[in-house]
């Protein structure tokens, strides 16, 4: 899907006075990053910035990156309302690498075909400082038949082996399927990756 598709989706939600995603951070992202000492972070494919804004509220210096300028403008408005300062970068996650290595990269629900997702993860790895953490969550291929929500196109769902091999070179603490209970009590199946870059990487 192109940035035009996403710009349109965010613009329609704004016109309707709604939001596309929840305002709360993803629960797993909050769980695994909430205990880290605040430093510098990138939220790659940040959308409306729910995870970026949450990290910023904890004292992280956050760069929110997305190829949808409309999505980011919603995040920018929310940041101003909350008195938070973030950097907002309109860029393609499959090609963008941070000029300055950071302590944390978050990727939440960046649903791309395998080759593009691999590029985005490789760029995230390249954007990490030594000792930095990569936290990724996304809809897993198993979700199509056994879970709720997410893309219905199998090519856009995460494959554990694709994610694991794109993160090769990092110390992988977790790379597995994760069962998430949704608001209505259904179960969604996500892929999670939690990994760190060795200090002598
Ligand atoms: C499902 S939304 C998730 C947004 C956010 N991470 C969250 O969890 O609320 C996916 C986001 O990925 C962005 N996206 C998709 N492909 C992208 C790409 N190649 N480069 C940058 N952003 C991309 C879309 O614009 C959209 O905002």
Image: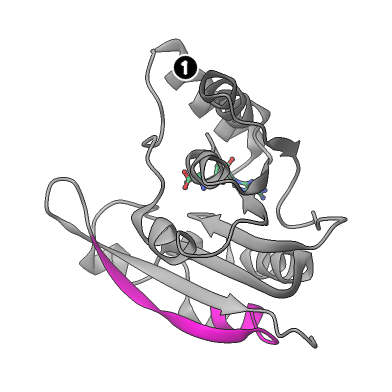
> Quadrant of the rendered structure where residue 88 is?
top right
Q: Position of residue 54 (x, y in %)?
A: 49, 43
Depth order, front residue of 60/120: 60
Q: Position of residue 194 (x, y in %)?
A: 51, 75
How many marks can you see? 1
Q: How is the image coloured?
A: one colour
Does dot 1 land on a helix, a strand or a loop?
Answer: helix
Residue furthest to the left: 185
Depth order, front residue of 109/106: 106
10 Å crowding of disc 1: few (<14), some (14-19), many (20+): some
> Quadrant of the rendered structure where residue 181 is?
bottom left
What range of the chain is rendered magenta? 163-180
The C terminus: image quadrant: bottom right
**Quick check: is the Cβ at mark 1 less than 8 Å away from ligand 1?**
no
Q: Position of residue 11 (x, y in %)?
A: 53, 19
- Seen at 60% across and 69% down, the residue is 134
> Quadrant of the rendered structure where residue 6 is?
top right
Residue furthest to the right: 99
> Image height check: is 2 above or below 27?
above
Q: Position of residue 133 (x, y in %)?
A: 61, 70
Is 196 on the left or on the right of 101, as rendered? left
- Seen at 52% across and 46% down, the residue is 58
Depth order, front residue of 46/141: 46
- Seen at 36% across and 66% down, the residue is 190
Q: Is residue 152 magenta?
A: no
- Seen at 64% across and 79% down, the residue is 167
> Image height check: is 184 above or below 153?
above
The N terminus: image quadrant: top right
Q: Quadrant of ligand 1?
A: top right
User: Which residue is identified by label 1?
Assistant: 14
């Amino acid at each position: 899907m192109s940035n035009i598709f996403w710009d349109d989706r965010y613009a329609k939600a704004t016109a309707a006075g709604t939001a596309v995603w929840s305002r709360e951070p993803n629960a797993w992202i909050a769980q695994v990053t909430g205990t880290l000492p605040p430093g510098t972070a990138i939220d790659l494919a940040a959308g409306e910035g729910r995870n970026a804004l949450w990290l910023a509220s904890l004292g992280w210096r956050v760069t929110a990156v997305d190829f949808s300028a409309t999505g980011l403008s919603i995040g920018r408005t929310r940041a101003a309302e909350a008195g938070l300062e973030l950097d907002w970068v309109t860029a393609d996650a499959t090609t963008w690498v941070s000029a300055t290595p950071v302590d944390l990269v978050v990727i939440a629900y960046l649903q791309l075909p395998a080759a593009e997702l691999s590029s985005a993860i490789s760029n995230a790895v390249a954007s990490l400082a030594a000792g930095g953490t990569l936290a990724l969550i996304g809809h897993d291929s198993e979700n199509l038949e056994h879970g709720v929500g997410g893309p219905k196109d199998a090519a856009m769902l995460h494959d554990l082996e694709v994610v694991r091999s794109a993160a090769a070179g990092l110390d992988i603490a977790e790379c597995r399927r994760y069962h998430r209970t949704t608001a209505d009590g259904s179960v969604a199946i996500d892929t999670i990756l939690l990994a760190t870059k060795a200090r002598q990487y």
